[in-house]
Amino acid sequence: MKLPRTRLTFAAAAAVTLVIVAAACSSSSKPSSTTSTTPTTTPTSSPPAAVPSAKTIDQPVTYGYYDGHVDWMLSTDVSNKGQATAQKINYSAALLIQPIDKFPSLYLIHGTAAPNQPMVFGSEPGKDDYSPLWRELDVTWKPGVKPVLLVKDDQINMLASQGKLTVTKTSIVLNCPIVKVTTTMTVPTAPTVSQPVVYGYYDSHVDTMLSTDVSNKSQATAKQLNYAPTLLAQPASKDPSLYMVSGTAAPNQPVVFNTEPGETDYSPLWQEVTVTWKPGVKPVLLVKDDQINMLASKGQLTLTKTGIVLNCPIVKVSA
């Protein structure tokens, strides 16, 4: 727990996937058969909220071109407060994990444009420089120039060099993970997509998150997530903690967050922290980061900080 929570402005502006699995940020929830020799208590004043059973959630989707084919993406977080309010997505100043010019480019076409012109990506999953964090670049056609359909970043840069359009670099970073790569040029019309979700506790209430990208290649393969080593542009220890209970646990134990949208330190990028109960200790339901740290200080469980960073934006905060 960091600061008093404020109300969530939550996810919506784009996106979706057939490759994401919510299990990426989930953890073992096997009931314990061990008899406790060390009493443990849960420091909560009221019973924690129940974890929902729904496996998916409908999310707005945004489409864009990369090298002439259409990719699908989610738009969940942005480093600009005004844009977060306008687009009803999460504000996260913590997205600025490296110099602005190090992020891949997301080209947004403004004003007069070719019919059905979507955005254009400067990378995609599978590329060495892919990151779910993008720098916004505004593209406008010059007066008197007839717009054509823009489908590649190389095309945009060539037309800019010919004086036919203007590319304006901004200092805004968006968290927009690509969740489906296609081979078609046809832009779909569906405004939403059903997507797997992961639930977790923050201060005894349940938040809903998506799991899309990870800095560890083997975990990306195992969980069918995007591999994005670019998430390690800063040390994992600088990201908020995502507590994942491993081994014996209380029944229906989900992950635990140590922040959420509305907190000043919220980020969709998380350092994985593995939680294991000590032998002989009867597990209780973990619902707060303060609770976890207190029990660790009493020697009842172990915390192992990993060097793995996950992109798991929270898209819904429950009351």
Image (cartoon, rainbow, N blue to C red):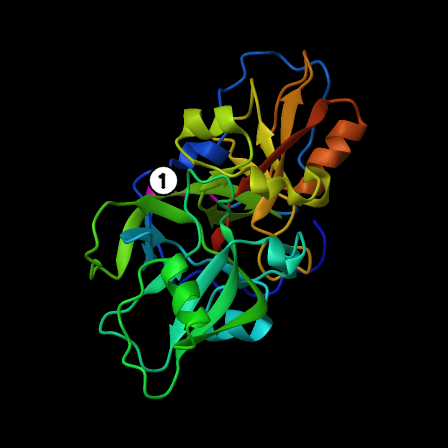
Above or below, comparing residue 159 to residue 77 in the picture: below
Q: Residue at x 58, y 27 (%)?
A: 245
Above or below, comparing residue 221 to residue 229 in the picture: above
| Residue at the farthest right position | 297
Disc 1 is placed on an element classified as loop
Q: Is residue 2 left or right of residue 193?
A: right
| Residue at the farthest bottom position | 144
- The percent position of residue 259, horizontal first and vertical second, equals 63, 50
- The percent position of residue 173, horizontal first and vertical second, equals 56, 61
- The percent position of residue 195, horizontal first and vertical second, equals 33, 46
Above or below, comparing residue 216 to residue 152 in the picture: above
Q: The disc labelled 1 sits on which kind of residue? A: Ser
Quadrant in the picture for residue 39: top right
Nearest the eye: 224 or 233: 233
- Does residue 147 appear anywhere in the picture? yes
Q: Is residue 240 left or right of residue 116?
A: right
Q: Residue at x 21, y 58 (%)?
A: 188
Nearest the eye: 62 or 171: 171
- The percent position of residue 65, horizontal first and vertical second, equals 32, 57
Q: Which residue is mark 1?
A: 53
Nearest the eye: 205 or 247: 247
Q: Residue at x 38, y 72 (%)?
A: 109
Q: Where are the magenta residues, as a range?
A: 50-56
Above or below, comparing residue 231 to residue 166 in the picture: above
**Magenta stretch secondary structure, dominant:** loop
- Does residue 28 appear anywhere in the picture? no
10 Å neighbourhood of mark 1: few (<14), some, or many (≥20)? few
Q: Is residue 33 magenta?
A: no
Q: Residue at x 36, y 64 (%)?
A: 119
